[in-house]
Image: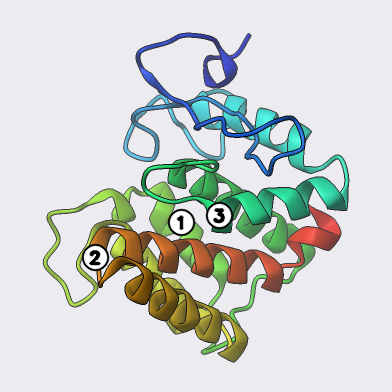
Amino acid sequence: MSRASSGDDPETVDPDIVGGDDAPRGTGVRLPKETWTSPRWNWGSANGDAHDAAAVVRATLNTDVERRREWLVALISSTPVMRLVPWEEAKLVMALAWQLSGHRGTDACARGDGSWLEVMERMRQGVYEDTTEKSLSGGGDRALVYEMEQRLGEAGTGLMQQAEKVAAEATDNDEEWTHDAVRRAACAALLLDLEFLEVGI
C-alpha cells in the first residue's frame, strides 16, 4: 500500500468521516503532514508521495461525473471543524486539474494573459506554504487564494464574494471560518472553469 493511502500513520492527515455511505465525502486519501515543501512529495515525478496520492485521488474521482459532483459538494460543505475534504486534498485536486489543463491546452486563465500552469509551478516550489510572507496577500494559502482571485472570471470571483458574505454573517466575522469558505469557493470555481465535472483530473 502506498504511503498516501496507508492506515494509522501518525505522519498522515486524515479526512473527517461524517454520516452514512451516501453522505458527501472526499477521496479518503491520507496525505503526509508535509507535502509541497517536502523532498518526498516530489511533484511531477513517477516516484514520491505526490505520485502515490495522485493515484488514489484519480482512481476515486475519475470514475464518473456523479462522484466528482459529490466531491464538490463535500468540498464546499467542509468547515474548519468538519473537514470532509481536507484543504491539502483540495490543493492536490487543483494541481491535478491544472496539470490536465496543460495537456488539453485549456490552461489559459479567464482574466489576464496568464496560465494556470504558472500557479501550479509556484505551488510545486512551495511558494504557497510560506506563512511568514508579509505581502498584500498575507502569504501562505492566502497568497494562493489572492492569485486565484486575480485569474478567475466574473462567475468565479462572484462565488468567492458570496461565500465570504455568507460565512462572515453566519460566524460573526470569524476570520478562520470566512477564509476557509472563500478558499473552498475559489477551488470549486476553478475546477468548474477547467471542466472538472466533465473530464475529471
**Residue on which disc 3 sits:** 77
Which residue is depicted at the point 33% across and 74% down? 168
The residues bearing labels 3 and 1 have C-alpha atoms spaced at a distance of 28 Å
Categorize mark 1 by other alpha carbons within 10 Å: few (<14), some (14-19), many (20+): some
Q: Is residue 171 above or below residue 61?
A: below
Which residue is depicted at the point 76% across and 42% down? 61
The residue closer to the viewer here, 60 or 106, is 60
Give the mark, 3 or 1, whose residue is nearer the N terminus.
3
Q: Is residue 36 left or right of residue 47?
A: left
**Of labels 1 and 2, the one closer to you:** 2
The residue closer to the viewer here, 156 or 173, is 173
Which numbered tag is attached to residue 121? 1
Instruction: Give the residue type that dot 3 points to.
Output: Ser
The residue closer to the viewer here, 34 or 29, is 29
Instruction: Give the residue type that dot 2 points to.
Output: Glu
Residue 196 locus on image (x, y percent)? 74, 60
Instruction: Give the residue type that dot 1 points to.
Output: Glu
**Which quadrant of the figure contains the N terminus?**
top right
Q: Is residue 101 above or below residue 27?
A: below
The residues bearing labels 1 and 2 have C-alpha atoms spaced at a distance of 28 Å
Q: Is residue 55 left or right of residue 180?
A: right
**Residue on which disc 2 sits:** 175
The residue closer to the viewer here, 127 or 79, is 79
Q: Is residue 35 left or right of residue 68?
A: left
Which residue is depicted at the point 46% across and 32% down? 42
Q: Secondary structure at mark 3?
A: helix
Categorize mark 2 by other alpha carbons within 10 Å: few (<14), some (14-19), many (20+): few
Which residue is depicted at the point 52% across and 68% down? 185
The residues bearing labels 3 and 2 have C-alpha atoms spaced at a distance of 17 Å
